[in-house]
Amino acid sequence: MSAQELITDHLDLWTGAVTHKSGTGRGASGKNGKIELTGIKKLRELILELAVRGKLVKQDPSDEPASVLLEKIAEEKARLVEEGKVRKPKKLKEKPGGYTAPFDIPDNWKWSPVDQLAPFPLFDGDWIESKDQDPTGSIRLLQLADIGVGEFKNTSRKYINSETFARLKCSRINAGDILIARLPSPIGRATVFPGLMQDCITAVDVAILRTEEMLNQQYVVHALNSTTCRNQVESYGKGATRFRISTGNLKTILIPVPPLPEQHRIVEKVDELMALCDRLEQEVGDQLEAHEVLVDTLLDALTHSTDAAELAENWARVAEHFDTLFTTEASIDKLKKAILQLAVMGRLVPQSLNDKHASALLDEILAERDRLKREEGMKTKASGAVNTEEAYLTIPRSWVWVRLGNTAKFIDYRGKTPKKVGSGKRLITAKNIRKGYIDKDPEEFISEPDYHTWMTRGFPRVGDTLFTPEAPLGNAANVDLEEEFALAQRAICFQWHVREISPFMLMQILALPFQEQLIFNATGMTATGIKAAKLKEIPVVLPPLEEQKSIVEKVEELMALCDRLKVRLGEAGETRAQLAETVVEQAVN
């Protein structure tokens, strides 16, 4: 099977594998995160691996063998040593496992350590400290950020002046030099330096291979970026926390060298296939972006339905295309957000004529608030009634608005965090409070005596809601820990005046309308947060208690459906990955 057939016959494997990541980047709109086309990425790796195994183009018996080419390079190196232009190379350091070839290659190819690929020895960039740099200098300092996988990124903007260049005896980088990154990520990545309109040097964590065009530089770069070489590089530092490969170890990496004419043919074929990958990537990226826009449009229409009839019409449109809409984790997460938003708008379950008006529940909540103020000295600065202009949702007639500060006692430990110890009473910090659950990792503790002197404002109970007012803003989870625990700073406990409202209130806090209110009322640039006084003033909706229970039950049912969809997606993804691995193994073996 040719490489072209390998791509076209398994197109669904390469284009069907997609991973969604947070942040921004190519392949998706920035607002919803980066889409990584993992299948096409795997295909690019396979193309390079086929290239270095002699399986991308046919061998030509008339080509001069690679052994003759390497002899010419060795002769040129000897001449340069004899003329004093380069130092006599040191004996190569012994490679872990010796110099056993990783796999068989065609008869007219030859394995060679990197150090024997060029007449000049592999050398490091220059050690340039911050004090040596000069933003007005004329000599560009290339850095790790400039080196992509087969791509010169040209992103750094550091300079030195000519006096520093002479004083530090820096090495000028030439167009055609191969730059190899000695730090992640990924480590060992390589690119050809295309040359710039100014003199350039490079940082010490970049190694330079100067082949003087005795090899096809782009073939060498493809080989260095292949899985074959990547595995060798990583064998020197697996398990290290800060893995940096030395130039001495880089010299020992084995490269499969074809005859020079075949190198040119391989590079031409790789360029052709990578261009095909680019087109596939563009097509899949466009399809995913169109899919994302469609999901956003339909869910936005759903959450902005003005009445039951319009809601039913918009839901029918979503349901009709359900299997094609929710085919990625990102789209399922958007569906979850829409479900929560519909829930807090009273659009998820029908209102019952038998339900009491929520004003009766509100009276019960306010009565408990007044009792706590009267008998326990609880203080609250939350205002009274919610004005019409403050209402940010259209809600059913049987629902009411109330300010958050009037629904719960705020247990807030602002200030210093108590001293942490190895064991004792568990300490729950903002790091433990996630969206919808309490993570026991990391485990932190304070001493028993400190617990009693620290927890003077109240003790969280099962069913209370923990909330993070900053770093991160807006995470919330209901307490399900039976053990006693201490609450750190930057975490607030809402102890609801009527405990039964806890499940619905948690959903409301996590829903988009309330989260938008948090952002609107937050302050700070680098670490956005909301003050407790502002938080108490935010209006929240209050349905009748029986309806709250129905809503929570329906949300849990729909969230379970979303989770099952995700599991199915994961299983399908694993199957695609296993099939792709099988195809790769068959192709390279």
Image (cartoon, grey):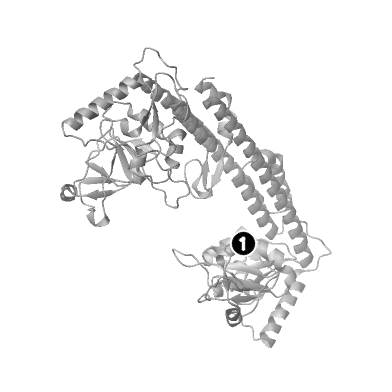
Q: Position of residue 316 (x, y in %)?
A: 72, 44
Q: Which of 357 and 153 is in front in this view?
A: 153
Above or below, comparing residue 183 to residue 459 in the picture: above
Q: Position of residue 414 (x, y in %)?
A: 53, 76
Above or below, comparing residue 344 to residue 234 in the picture: below
Horizontal side, residue 412 vs residue 345: left or right: left
Q: Residues within 10 Å of mark 1 (few under 14, many from 20)?
A: some
Residue type, numbered disc 1: Asp
Secondary structure state at the residue bearing disc 1: loop
**Residue at which label 1 appears:** 439
* Residue at the far top in the pictured view: 62
Q: Nearer the viewer, residue 125 or 192?
A: 125
Q: Position of residue 248 (x, y in %)?
A: 33, 41
Q: Nearer the viewer, residue 224 or 252?
A: 252
Above or below, comparing residue 218 to residue 348 in the picture: above
Q: Quick check: can you spot residue 471? A: yes
Q: Nearer the viewer, residue 472 or 28?
A: 472
Query: On the rendered image, what quadrant is the N terminus found in?
Result: top right
Query: Which residue: 54% across, 40% down?
Result: 289
